[in-house]
Image (cartoon, rainbow, N blue to C red):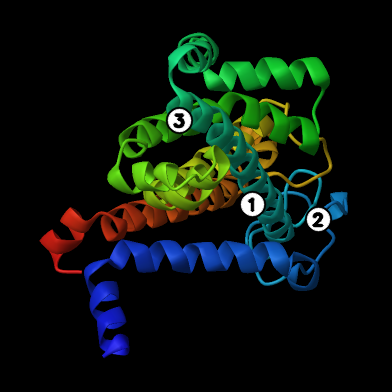
Amino acid sequence: MARATIGYRLKHQPLAVIGVSLLVLFAAMALLASAAAPYDPAAIDLSHRLLSPGHGHWFGTDELGRDIFSRILYGARISLIVAVSVVAISLSLGMLIGGLAGYYGGWVDTALNIFLMNAFLALPGILLAIAFVAFLGPGLFNLVLALSISGWVGYARLVRAQVLAVREREFVEAARALGAGDVRIFTRHIVPNIVQPILVQAAIGMAGAVLAEATLSFLGLGIPAPAPSWGSMLNDARSHLFDSPHLVVFPALAVMGCVLSFNFIGDALRDYLDPRTRMAVGL
């Protein structure tokens, strides 16, 4: 029965199957890059520069003779590290600040929501990240920190709204009447009831983090060379767009596939965790 139920759900959510399959593929690429890459991603071989895809180099080589397939594999590691790190830090900040604002309300909500959150929302996130990285310099830590600082507000607003809707429910009042403290009420009674939309937002946020990392790397503000970031590969390929289009095609497909995988998983989670949608499609 359980196996039939899983098969029925997968049949009615093909995008979830595609998303999970793509994510497993990119995770395998990131974890097995050292063993699966046929060449050193930073090895320069000018005698084999700008080779078209073939037997020796499946995705061809770039203008310095570096193997594109190997660089795509190592680029998956950078993109997934950035995505997981950014979402973890942003979600932690959002849970803390949004939870405080929604649970206590009053002047705490005014200070955190009206002043702090709106101040960050007034600045475009990608421009704030660009300014932050430009000030501190490129690097993995600075990149993750910049994207987290510009991305926590969305999680905080979502958490605040969910906490406001749950804090006056009967089970919360019952826990408070029994003498439970604020920390226990929040962690044991409120968080489990608001986790569904947060999971969906986190999945979609990972897609945004991958795209933001590629954007900053394309602008030269991401991981410094010779690290094989997909965004920096696209930047290096601009001058060979017409004579060697494979330099653009494969990194662009990698970014697109990774972003789509997280978006598909986010949509599938939203449909599965929403009882109304689940009843409508018969899941």
The outermost residue toward the bottom is 1
Type of the residue with mark 3: Tyr
Q: Are marks 3 and 1 in contact (CB under 8 Å)?
A: no
Sequence-first tag of 1 and 2: 2
147 up-or-down from 35: above or below: above
Please, is residue 268 above or below residue 54 in the view? above
Quadrant location of the N terminus? Answer: bottom left
Q: Is residue 22 left or right of residue 283?
A: right
Give how far across and how far down residue 57 sits, in percent: 70, 65
Report helix, strand or loop for mark 2.
Answer: loop
**In front: 140, or 219?**
140
Q: What is the secondary structure assignment of the residue under circle 1?
A: helix
Mark 3 or mark 1, which has the lower sequence index?
1
Which residue lies at the image location 20% right of the left edge and 69% below the top edge? 283
Q: Which mark's residue is nearer the viewer, 2 or 3?
A: 3
Q: Position of residue 166 (x, y in %)?
A: 34, 39
Secondary structure, mark 3, is helix
Identify the residue under disc 3.
Answer: 103
Residue wearing tag 1: 80
Question: Which residue is farthest front?
Answer: 178
Q: Residues within 10 Å of mark 1 (few under 14, many from 20)?
A: many
Q: Are marks 1 and 2 in contact (CB under 8 Å)?
A: no
Q: CA distance from mark 2 to mark 3?
A: 50 Å
> Hey, which quadrant is residue 59 in on the image?
bottom right
Q: Which residue is mark 2?
A: 41
Q: Position of residue 169 (x, y in %)?
A: 30, 41
